[in-house]
Image (spheres, grey):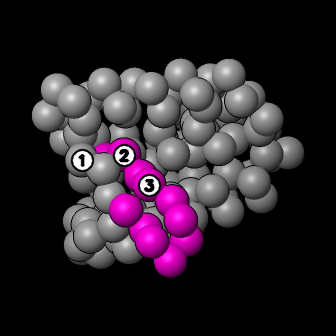
Amino acid sequence: MTLDILKSRLGVGEGITVYDDELSALLLAAESDIEAAGVPSWLISADDARVQLAVTAFVKAHYGDDRQNRALRSDACRRADAAGDALWREQKARGQRWCVLL
């Protein structure tokens, strides 16, 4: 996923670069963590729609300081998991759980 695609999905206007450093770091973190959760690197680099959705959800959950929306998205992942529409991946080394929407 490119930074421009991510910015578009977040509603960050063209030409606005003040958030680029934070968004680039979050993009790399999302792709790295998705790969660590078991998604093959070739699928991540292929810009698969499911990967783009997972990256966007990750970035939205960690972007800025909007803790209320972070909790809402986490709840949405839990509901999707209960319905069989998501897969939780555990990252024991980091003590984190990730929701991958299927």
Q: CA distance from mark 3 to mark 1?
A: 10 Å
Tell me which amino acid carries mark 3.
Answer: Arg
Picture disc at residue 97: 3
Q: What residue does disc 1 label?
A: 87
Q: Is residue 13 visible?
A: no
Q: Position of residue 42 (x, y in %)?
A: 24, 73
Q: What residue does disc 2 label?
A: 99
Which residue occupies 18% across, 33% down?
85
Q: Which residues are magenta?
A: 90-100
Quadrant in the rendering for residue 83 = top left
Which quarter of the figure is the C terminus placed in? top left
Q: Decide whether the magenta segment is chiefly helix, strand or loop.
A: strand
Tell me which amino acid carries mark 2.
Answer: Cys
Q: Is residue 97 magenta?
A: yes
Which residue occupies 71% across, 30% down?
67
Name the side, left or right, on which 42 lies relative to 25: left
Which of the pair 91/63 is nearer the observer? 91
Q: Is residue 98 magenta?
A: yes
How crowded pointer 2 is (Cα within 10 Å; few <14, some 14-19, many 20+) is rated as many
Which residue occupies 40% across, 25% down?
76
Which quarter of the figure is the N terminus placed in? bottom left
Name the side, left or right, on which 14 lies relative to 17: left
Q: Position of residue 44 (x, y in %)?
A: 32, 64
Q: Secondary structure at mark 1?
A: strand
| Sooner in the amino-acid sequence: mark 2 or mark 1 | 1
How crowded pointer 3 is (Cα within 10 Å; few <14, some 14-19, many 20+) is rated as few
Which residue occupies 36% across, 40% down?
53
Name the side, left or right, on which 42 lies relative to 3: left
- Mark 2 or 3: the one toward you: 3
